[in-house]
Image (cartoon, grey):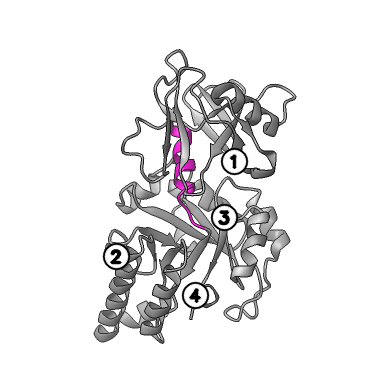
Amino acid sequence: MSNTAAVRVAVGILRHDDGRILLASRPADKPWPYWWELPGGKIEPQEAPMDAVARELREELGIAIDPQHTHHWHTLTHHYPKGTVILELFIIRAWAGRPQPLEGQHLAWTHPAQLEHIGPILPASLPILRWLQLPQYYLISSAYAHPERWLRRLEHTLQTGTYWVQFREPEWQQHAHHDPHAAQALQHCFIQTLKICARYRTRCLVNSVHPRNWWRRAHGVHVRSSDAAALTTLTNKGLYSLHAHFGLSADHFIGISAHNRVELHQAFELHADFAVLGHVLPTPSHPHTPALGWERFATLCQTVALPVYALGGQRPDTLSTALSLGGQGIAGMRQLLLP
């Protein structure tokens, strides 16, 4: 790795309401020619990142961004063999003008999950494109006592919007270890959950308490904080290192649970796709454990370049608070499900 000073870059993520984003190919006369990336460019000395992204998109694409519909999302550091870049990421939902390739680049509007028709993606853009696929709601199962109720409520909820689901049944799994009937019922509920999710094109991750051969059948794995603590040899090994360790394809997603700063930073260093942090508000499931509170949640979110969901006491009306404090969204069990 080079010892030269890191280069600060302002990145503009132009995003339509349907989820499509704009990608641009790098010109032939620049490093990494013809590789695709999110538009943007170098921040000049003494220039504010917001001013830089506005200038760069005006020069590259001929558009004027709307500051009222532009917000800073994350600051991501990426190490290339010949240097380091610090990316200031901005999500932009409104702009004036039609993007034009003013620097000889090619442009493409695409969904972050549909990159088959795009050429090679610049390495620094890869984790960002994964983050852009995440929803604002992350549902967690609670099916052990009443599996049919869970399946019914899940289907009703998925009809109404965009969600991801985590299948997490630790008590049921413990019972299944010594009861074949419980094991069979648990697996049946898991399969039915996958079928419902598939019907509504919803990603379903399975908690790491469940058998590993289930992880590949789902869209990924959600790793418990205790399991993540055993993965210290994989920290800072790069994107997809967890996938290689677990034998999962790059299409799978990996989330990690965290309850404090140390665990959240470990999720970041393991290159998880996202973390779930809690509990943020008081919850009946942890009556004797103090809640983090929104102020602490916001502080912790600012310490990592990683999407973070708020967990604990979350309801639909707390989503705006989580988003305003830098969270990716909210996670929860019963209160996020429709009857």
Give the CA distance from mark 1 to mark 3: 16 Å
Q: What residue type is labelled 4?
A: Leu
Instruction: Point out the tag, 4 or 3, that comes first from the N-terminus.
Output: 3
Dot 3 falls on a residue whose secondary structure is loop
Q: What stretch is highlighted in magenta?
A: 122-135
Give the CA distance from mark 3 to mark 2: 26 Å
User: What x and y, as percent, mark residue 54?
Assistant: 65, 30
Left or right of 233, for residue 296:
right
User: Badge 4, how many Cα within 10 Å: few under 14, some, many 20+?
Assistant: many
Which residue in the protein does label 4 denote? 337
User: What x and y, as percent, mark residue 330?
Assistant: 56, 63
**In this view, the mark in front (4 or 1):** 1
Give the CA distance from mark 4 to mark 3: 19 Å
Discs 3, 2 touching: Cβ within 8 Å: no
Q: Which residue is drawn at 58% across and 42% down?
A: 91
Which residue in the protein does label 1 denote? 92
Left or right of 81, for residue 172:
left
Q: Quadrant of residue 84?
A: top right
Q: Residue at x 49, y 75 (%)?
A: 337
Which residue in the protein does label 3 denote? 328
Q: What residue type is labelled 3?
A: Gln
Q: Is residue 149 above or below residue 39?
A: below
Secondary structure that dominates the magenta span: helix
**In this view, the mark in front (2 or 1):** 1
Q: Does the magenta stretch include residue 130?
A: yes
Question: Which residue in the rendered view is the most extreme toward the front?
Answer: 97
